[in-house]
Image: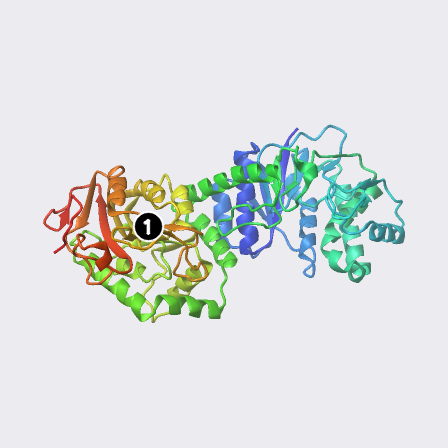
Amino acid sequence: MTTTYSCYVDAHPAFEWQALLLCASLIHNAGVAPEDIIFHGSPDISESFLAALRSFGAQFEPTVQFDETHAYCNKIKQASSKRFSGYDTVVLCDCDLYFLGPLPQRPEGISAMGRQVDLGNPPLHMLREIYESAGLKEPEVVPTRYSTKASEETFASNWNGGLYVLSTRTLPRFAEAWERFARYLLQDHSDRLGQYRNHIDQIAFAMALDETGLPWQTLNPGHNHPTHLPAPTYAETAPASLHYHREQDALGQLTYAYSAPHATACATANAQIRELIGNRFLTDPSFEAVFSNWQQHKGTASSQELDHARGLFREARYMRHSARRLEHLASLQLDLHGKTVLEFGAGIGEHSQFFFDRGCSVLSVEPRASNCAEMRRKHTDPAEYLPAAGHRILQAAATDATKIFSQARFQIIYNYGLLYHMTDPLGFLKQSCTLASELYLLETAVSDLVTSQTQYSEDTTNATNAIEDQCLLVSRAEIFETMKSELPYVYVPRTQPAHEQFLRDWTTPREMTTGRHSAIFIGSTQPLDEAIFSPELLDYHD
């Protein structure tokens, strides 16, 4: 028995990204051949999405909308597609479905398979009124699988619209009824349905199932498994496909609620999503464009948020601190021209410009949406020198970025002003050192000569501060030894930036120093000039 998988994709960054995740999960987890995946969608879908689909080997069929006033019914248009010829079974999916394993084969003689709804949407009394007005006989009534109300019931044919398995032999007959009932509901019941109007496609599916009398069978609740409900009834159900209802973070990873099966299954999916980004973001421009559009959509910031972020990074003290560090870096006579740079904790890209001036390409990693949005705004502002060409932006925590790009290598890792904002600075340092193919440039506050607590918290609402609850200062010696464990050559510069945070004398008694003190470290895969760099920690700098 041959099976094809289909999904309707609207021209929107969220749906295009979700469709790529669906495609990847079908290929890698459900064992579906790429040529058996057919996406239907709006003719104005982005060219980058189409190119990304082609790189996966999947197909696309331009398909007009069902009704411009009701996008939720667009999936109905798939049912009348001519692309299913030669297949016995078609599986209609929502974009926000992620497969962890294969579907069971549709039994011979069964025309439809699906999973009954979790909630009574719409309420049973509405379904009864609709069926009565349409002249349909009331079907079997069953309990919903999950509800906040005791003993909530619905029709047995009221299935969640995220996943339908249909026989192509009986599909033409079913598709006609499905479309007819959807148009009937839009015309005669749209206002009456109110908040349940978005379920018209689902209600029409039930009506078509009951009118045609086609034989059907329900799927195990592990298929089309909801991740947004704290349902104890799912505790012993191993999810085989996750319906995440658009609940995603900026990396496109699935977020979930409450129960252990959700956590385990979503962790598996999220590890695969990170791997997918790591494999394709740097090598497939079309995939990069779809993912970047998703991040930009997810991380939209208001003009007030952009102004606030810009103001924080451009306070006089902050700009002076940045200037002193960068002029010092420029004085070290390192080969920093024409390199690939991975920049951690990029903020609004104030340091990125240093590398663009030297002909580098830069991947800026920054966890805050407002900071990423400000970098993108600067791409279009001629008063800012932050060119879009050669500049990639990834909204992610630095720890996530190291996992995503664990198999990638960058000529320069730039880690200025981040390490002391982290809960596990040495763990991150050790992991991120493996990404450097030439140089690791590190500047951070250290615990040497600090009279206050080395473990502390920061105001996480400040866009220049930590995103983690707890921060930890570590010593110069700990940093130096950690870098030496991963890189063949580690140095400290013999000079320091011309700024009071950078001590020239590390023997000064603790009680004579105030505030935090910072240090610079250079890791390298090749030996450096020891007239400029010391291979040992220094007590005194020039």
- Residue at 89% from the left image edge and 44% from the top image edge: 137
| SS for callout 1 | loop
Res 58 seen here: no
Left or right: where does residue 410 sit relative to residue 528?
right
The mark tally for this picture is 1
Colour option used: rainbow
Q: Work out whether residue 517 or residue 520 is closer to the camera in this orientation and state it.
A: 517
Q: Quadrant of residue 169?
A: top right
Q: Work out whether residue 534 or residue 199 is closer to the camera in this orientation and state it.
A: 534
Left or right: where does residue 248 sit relative to residue 235?
left
Q: Which residue is mark 1?
A: 473
- Residue at 43% from the left image edge and 52% from the top image edge: 468
Q: Position of residue 265 (x, y in %)?
A: 57, 37
Q: Work out whether residue 237 or residue 155 is closer to the camera in this orientation and state it.
A: 237
Q: Quadrant of residue 333?
A: bottom left
Against 403, residue 506 (above or below) is below
Q: Position of residue 315 (x, y in %)?
A: 34, 70
Q: Work out whether residue 54 or residue 408 is closer to the camera in this orientation and state it.
A: 408
Q: Quadrant of residue 66?
A: bottom right
Q: Quadrant of the C terminus?
A: bottom left
Q: Quadrant of the N terminus?
A: top right
Against 246, residue 195 (above or below) is below
Q: Residues within 10 Å of mark 1 (few under 14, many from 20)?
A: many
Res 448 seen here: yes
Q: Position of residue 2 (x, y in %)?
A: 64, 31
Q: Position of residue 146 (x, y in %)?
A: 73, 43
